[in-house]
Image: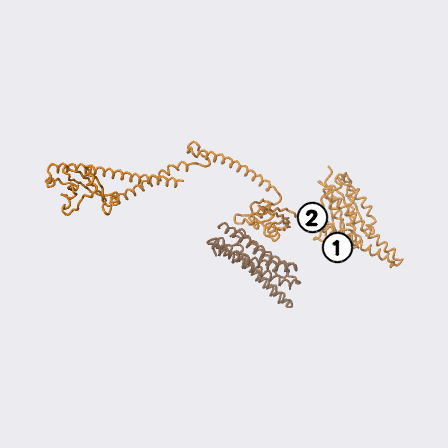
Chain colours: A brown, B orange
Amino acid sequence: MRNKFDEQLERLNVELIKMGALCSEAISKAVKALLDRDTEMIEKAKEADEEIDRKEREIEGMCMRLLLQQQPVARDLRVISSALKMISDMERIGDQASDIAEIAKYIISENTNSETHIKDMAKEAIQMVTDSIDSFVHKDLTMAQKVIDYDDIVDRYFDRIKTELIALIAKDNTKGEYYIDLLMIAKYLERIGDHATNIAEWVKYSIAGEH
Amino acid sequence: MSKKIFKGIFLVSFLTLVACLALIMGVLYQYFGDELQTELRNEASFVAQGVEASGEDYFADMPASKARVTWIDASGDVLFDSVADETTMENHSDRQEFIDAKELGVGEATRYSGTLAEKTVYYAMRLSDGTVIRVSTTQSTVWSLLVSMLQPIMIVLAVSIVLSGILASKMAKHIVKPINAIDLDQPDLDHAYEEISPLLLKITRQNQTIQHQMDELSRQRHEFSVITENMNEGLVVIDNMTDVLSYNSAAQRLLGGKITEDAKSVFALNRSETFRRAVDKALSGQHAEELLKTGSMVCRVIANPVRTDGTVTGAVLIVFDVTQAEENEAIRREFTSNVSHELKTPLTSIFGISEMLKNGIVKPEDVKKFGKDINDETGRLITLVNDIIRLSQLDENKFADEKQPVDLYETAKSVIKQLQNYAGDNKVSLELFGEHCKVNGIPTVLDEMVYNLCDNAIKYNKENGSVRISVEETDDAIVLTVKDTGIGIPKEDLNRVFERFYRVDKSHSKKIGGTGLGLSIVKHAAACHDASLQIDSRVDEGTTISVAFPKLK
């Protein structure tokens, strides 16, 4: 019986890794669509989001079955409950990646790279997601903490881009809509950073039991 | 085992104790019964003598006795009784002991009381006058005795239980102790029970076999790990839960991640989309092959399922570094597409002109001009094909063994002679400096190299410009330098001008001509001679290319 339980926990772990990997891919693709003006990537980002949604339901089902059938306690319970929380954060990352791709579709003709720091911000957000998944894969507390601390940097990027966009709108108000779209994207990236932080916090909780 | 022994001993000793108790009690009871009977007999004969001697008076001063004495006359009526009133007593003629005594002289009988708690033993004796003296006494039966002795018996039983328990436990421990003391890894055959020595002998032999097999196994594992560690290809063996069972350092290097105690899944090594696809496909029982990009590297991942009894129990992944191969492949693809493009352009114009000529829509006075066009384009094609042939020859290093000392100065001189007219047409002056230096080389290749360098220097020069060619011997090399005063090459293109078909002017303009292979041939020719190339250029000022050949030994 225990053996079966361990096996199910292991499977849960692997599925979570896969879902995390999907998340970093979804956001990478969305950002690629935006920055490299790659229309093909828009569809791919959306497909990844759908896959993430499917994975979320699958993992949710796994967790529920584990909770009901095995009635885990202590560390096992922590692992499963944090998995439940983590997948909802991952799912949100997928949604936001898909939203970015959606906006990218309309502003793909514009040159996004040069005027603001959105490229740097996207790079940091992707790194945060990748690192949070890494901290989960390796059950690495220090890395999880690094991700949590890193959130400030992404937040600062958001403020900076906001200021930049205000200046740009003041200079050329004909492109107002485009700049507002960019602001939305920056906000999504900032949210993605927050979700990555949440994931890192759940990793910490599942390892050390602190939250 | 000690439990079983304990149970056995305990049961046996307890039963023995209980049986002893019962036996002793039975024997004692019998003994006391017999004693009683003898006593009764003695008493009866004593009373009989007394009555014979002194008649009824004997009873008057009869000594006190435990026994009840009854005197019965021949008809069975009681004449005297030491306990009850003889007048109230019934006739005794039907009593067994009386009947026996009358007939045989003596009679005995035992009768139980209503409750069976007591039994009365009678002894009767006929006197000479026909009367009968009967002596009787009561005795407790076994059952009443047992009931009355219940408490001491219980105590004895309890003591015997405790005693046998203690004894049994001690015995059991004592018996098992030497068995427990056996060291199974190295059993001491001399000090063990004789009965289990065959077992120990067998264990010893099996221990040796196991040890031998373990040694063999660890030797094989070591061998295996030495082999896999020295492989350039990554090797990963996983189970069906994606946990890594075995991997080598190359796998870790190529896939980028690391396996730790907490992260045993193969996805800790790499979790990219393509890698996951390969792993999932292999674990679903299919062969999978994927190209994986990790950072600057390109790896080919081959995943094969491992089957045990028809079900997939894991997978073996092999990872090759194909970065170089992929790069070469990309260059080759680019080359092919360039070649086809370069070949197509002149052919298209030849085709177009020839079609016009065929349909007769060309005015006779223009035929000559079109003929010249065809001629020019064909010339271009021939140059191009020659260049490609030359390049492929250089690629395959076909000239490797034809090297001979060549005077570079003479080569440059002959090239200048060939190009003099061309330079004149372009209003460019050619100058040669330096000394006669010999290098070990292939004359045709060297000629081609110098020709291409000078050709470029003229081609990309300005009106009234100059080309300076020098051949010098320095401390460690023989250097050929071609310096022009031409249009120069922009900095960002400097690294790429030696690539095949790379043109700074992307329009592939026909005005200048050239195939885009010239510098590529120079590069290959230099490589063929172990020479190093150096290029220095400024836009609008000119370009200097120098080739440093190793000195002749």
The answer to whether one can see residue B194 in this image is yes
Front position in the image: B125 or B175:
B125
The numbered mark 2 sits on a residue in which chain?
B
Q: Position of residue B37 (x, y in %)?
A: 21, 38
Task: Report whether B393 appears left or right of B321.
Answer: right
Task: Report whether B335 appears left or right of B282.
Answer: right
Q: Badges 1 and 2: C-beta atoms under 8 Å apart?
A: no
Task: Report whether B137 appears left or right of B290.
Answer: left
Front position in the image: B340 or B25:
B25
Q: Nearer the viewer, mark 1 or mark 2?
A: 2
Q: Residues within 10 Å of mark 2 (few under 14, many from 20)?
A: few
Q: Position of residue B505 (x, y in %)?
A: 75, 55
The numbered mark 1 sits on a residue in which chain?
B
Residue carrying label 1:
B505
Give the alpha-carbon distance from disc 1 to disc 2, as whole Å. 24 Å
Residue carrying label 2:
B328
Q: Residues within 10 Å of mark 1 (few under 14, many from 20)?
A: few
Mark 1 or mark 2: whose residue is earlier in sequence: 2
Front position in the image: B275 or B150:
B150
What is the total number of numbered labels drawn onto the structure image?
2
Q: Residue at x 51, y 51 (%)?
A: A4
Q: Quadrant of the C terminus of chain B?
A: top right
Q: Which mark is residue B127?
A: none
Q: Label 2 amino acid?
A: Asn
Quick one: SS at disc 1?
loop
The outermost residue toward the bottom is A173
Q: Is residue B458 above or below residue A152?
A: above
Q: Quadrant of residue B138?
A: top left
Quick one: SS at disc 2?
helix
Q: Position of residue B446 (x, y in %)?
A: 77, 43
Q: Label 1 amino acid?
A: Asp
Q: Quadrant of residue B25?
A: top left
